[in-house]
Amino acid sequence: MILDKQKIDSLNSDGLTLHQNKIQVLKDSIPNFEEVISKLVDFQIAIPSWALGTGGTRFGRFAGTGEPRNIEEKLEDVALLNDLTKSCNSISLHIPWDIPQDYDALRAKASDLGLHFDAVNSNTFQDQKGQDFSYKFGSLHHVNKDIRQKAIEHNIEVIQHGDKLGSKALSLWLSDGSDFPGELNFRGAFERTLESLQEIYKALPDDWKFYIEYKCFEPHFYSTTIADWGQSYLLASKLGPKAVTLVDLGHHLPGANIEQIVSLLLMEDKLAGFHFNDSKYSDDDLTAGSINPYQLFLIFHELVEGLDHKGKRHATDIGWMIDASHNVKDPIEDLLQSVEAIKLAYAQALIIDQNALTGAQNNNKVALAQDIIQDAYRTDVRPLLAEARLRSGAALSPIKAFNSLDIRNELVKERGLHSVATGL
Ligand code: PSV
Ligand code: MN
Ligand code: MN
């Protein structure tokens, strides 16, 4: 389904006067108003192919309707999201959940839709149909060299798929770990993982990055071989400049100060980017900003400050992606909410008075420093996002547009009520 631009324009004209009143107030009060708007226009967030269908939990899955049945339809859903927001112009594929057939045709379709391919993800956390070996006891850290070799080869194949599509990064989440004390020699597991990663690293094209994700637990419940940012950072440092640490917001122990992790990784040029989501208990993969929007803002504060300090570009020098799963919401609505929450946090960080904050910090004015950042956090920046969308030809209110244009029902007409989704 392709969105009719005229319909978006006509919805936008209905809400225009109200928007103009709201934006005037912000124009008058934000000194760097134009700069903020242009940064918001530039800022794009990649959509993971697996978030376009209903996810479910290990207890069950309640399928949605009109879900994408293949990569082409997943691209079309990302294009819908992008037409509504002009903020998500790329898709991240997961191999072998997504196996391209005709690379040229897929690339052409993506470019017709105004999209490109973000990082490609490998998968050695499941055994595939017909596989004559098992990842039950791990993949890249396995004690058996042949199994490690299979996992290495899989990652190299993923790079090849991505290369044909124009991706520029391999994203690796290693589920390897152990469930019981004594099961695993930690040092041995780490050394074998490093050796395996070195083989994969050798196969990376020169202009690629290698994103190394960490996760404190799950699917294993005693140890994870790449459990935290220190372990990922250690591997990335030993591997070389193309290897960087990926932060998935749901992969930390409760109470972790993620913003501080982000600040230090950025300082060391080792921050790959993000998998945005939110959680209350562990890796809940909920809509970004739905539980703790203040944490998201504090992370963006460190990002903006750190990227500016390094003279790096916000939009392109870091990988921005959502990694969420939807059990009860429409995936498209959920993703629209995530995109909105991420960009709100970014906009709030952009309006922090950095000079005043540095002054307060250097003079130990603690209450003042808190007031400065909370002033930005408590500003209603929703009209800034709407203005950025308006200027880029997107919808003033994406979720309202999704519902008034009856998009899900249109997709059901095209794909059927019980279409098949690939996902977690
Ligand atoms: C599993 O925790 C996970 O959510 C990781 O965050 C990966 O990025 C994702 O699955 C896809 O492999
Ligand atoms: Mn992730
Ligand atoms: Mn996860």
Image: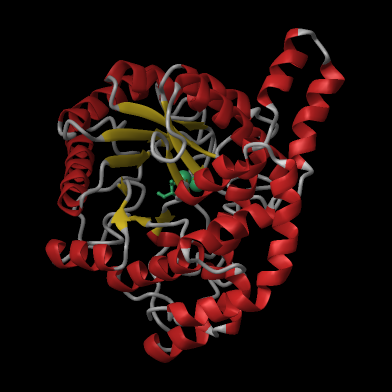
Total labels: the figure holds 0
Quarter location, residue 244: top left
- Left or right of 106? Residue 324 is right
The spot of residue 330 in percent (x, y) is 56, 72
> Which residue reaches farthest right?
367
| Quadrant where the C terminus is found in the figure | bottom left
The spot of residue 166 in percent (x, y) is 21, 49
Task: Write the residue at 59% across / 79% down.
Answer: 11
- Left or right of 294? Residue 276 is left
- Position of residue 221 relative to residue 86, above or below, is above
Task: Write the residue at 36% across / 47% down.
Answer: 125
The spot of residue 92 in percent (x, y) is 35, 53
- Left or right of 123? Residue 219 is right
Residue in the foreground of this view, choosing between 82 and 40:
40
Does the image show residue 57? no
Does the image show residue 401? yes
